[in-house]
Image (cartoon, grey):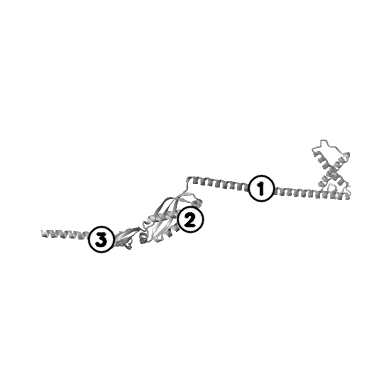
Amino acid sequence: MELGSVVSTFSIFAIAIVVLMILVVIMAVKSVPQGYEWTVERFGRYIGSLRPGLSFIVPFFDRIGAKINMMESVLDVPTQEVITKDNAMVSVDGVVFYQVLDAAKAAYEVNNLENAVLNLTMTNVRTVMGSMDLDELLSQRDKINAQLLHVVDDATQPWAIKVTRIEIRDISPPRDLVESMARQMKAEREKRAQILEAEGARAAAILRAEGEKQSAILEAEGQREAAFRAAEARERGAEAEAKATQMVSDAIAKGSVQAVNYFLGVKYVEALRDVAGAPNQKVIMMPLDAANVIGALGGIAELAKDAMQNRASGGGGGPWQQPGGAPRS
C-alpha cells in the first residue's frame, strides 16, 4: 500500500512537471505574423518589440502588450456637415490611408489609435473646407486633399504614423443649391452659345463684305481693261483711217481723181448704212445730189473692176493705180 501510494504521488508530480513545462514553453514562445509587431512589457514596463517570426520571452515576467498592425491601413471618414466660407452647407465623407512606423510610439503615445486618427481627420476636414467657397470646394478637390494630407500628417508625427493619402470621396450640396447651380450652368452655356453665334455672324458678315469688295475690285479692273481695249481699238481705227486719208491725199497729189471718188463713195455708203439702221427711221430720204451719190457708186464699181483686172494681170497696185504702178487719169 505504501509503495502504491508513493508511485501514485510520483506520477502526479511528474504529470504536474510536464504540464508546467508545456505551459512555460507556451508562454515563452511567441509566433508573430507577417505585417505585425508585438510590444513586450515586463512588470508593466515596455522593454521591446517582437518582429514577425518566432520569438521568445521570459515566462511569468514578460507579457505581450499591444499587437500593432504595421501594414498600410484604410480608415473610412463618416459623412459630416461642413459650412463653407459663403455659408453653404454640404455633406462630405472620405477615406484616410495611414501606416504605423514605430509600434512602441503607436501603442504608448496615443490611446485608441484609429479613433484618434479619425477624429483628427474629421476636424481638419471641417477646418480646411470651411475656409473655401462652394465653387472652389467643388472644383479643387486635389488642393483640398493636399492640404488635409499636410495638416494631418504633421499632427500624427508624434505617434510615429505616416499618413500616405487622404481622399475626399463625396461632396453633396443641398438639393435647392444643386438646382440653382444647374440653372446657373445652363444660363452660362446659353450665354456662351449666343456669344459664339454672334461671333459666327460677325465673321460671316466680314467674309461676305470681303467677297463683295474683291468682286467690286475685279469688276473695276475688268471695266478698266475693257476701256483700255476699246481705247486701243479706237486708236488703231483712227490710225487706219488716218493712213487711208494719207493714201488718198497722196493719190490726189499724184493726180488720181478716182481715189477721191472712192473715198467719198465709201463715206456715202457708211452714212446711208447708219441712216438705214436707225430705229426711228421708216423712210430713207435721198439727198438732192443723188446723182453724185450714184456717180460715186459707179466710180467705186469701176475701181473694183480695175482692181480685179490688176490682180488678174499680176499687178500689185491699189484700186486707183494702173498695172504699171502709175495712177489712172
Q: Dots 1 and 2: beta carbons under 8 Å?
A: no
Which amino acid type corresponds to the residue marked 1 in the rendered image?
Ala
Relative placement, left or right, of 186 versus 103 is: right
Q: Dots 3 and 1: beta carbons under 8 Å?
A: no
Residue under pointer 3? 25
Q: Foreground residue, 209 or 301?
A: 209
Across and down, in percent, residue 84 comes to 48, 51
In the image, farthest residue toward the left? 1
Across and down, in percent, residue 108 comes to 35, 60
Visible residue check, residue 213: yes
Q: Earlier in the sequence, mark 2 or mark 3?
A: 3
Q: Residues within 10 Å of mark 3 (few under 14, many from 20)?
A: some
Q: Earlier in the sequence, mark 3 or mark 1?
A: 3
| Badge number at residue 143 | 2
Location of residue 114 (image quadrant): bottom left
Which amino acid type corresponds to the residue marked 3 in the rendered image?
Val
Location of residue 42 (image quadrant): bottom left
Which amino acid type corresponds to the residue marked 2 in the rendered image?
Lys
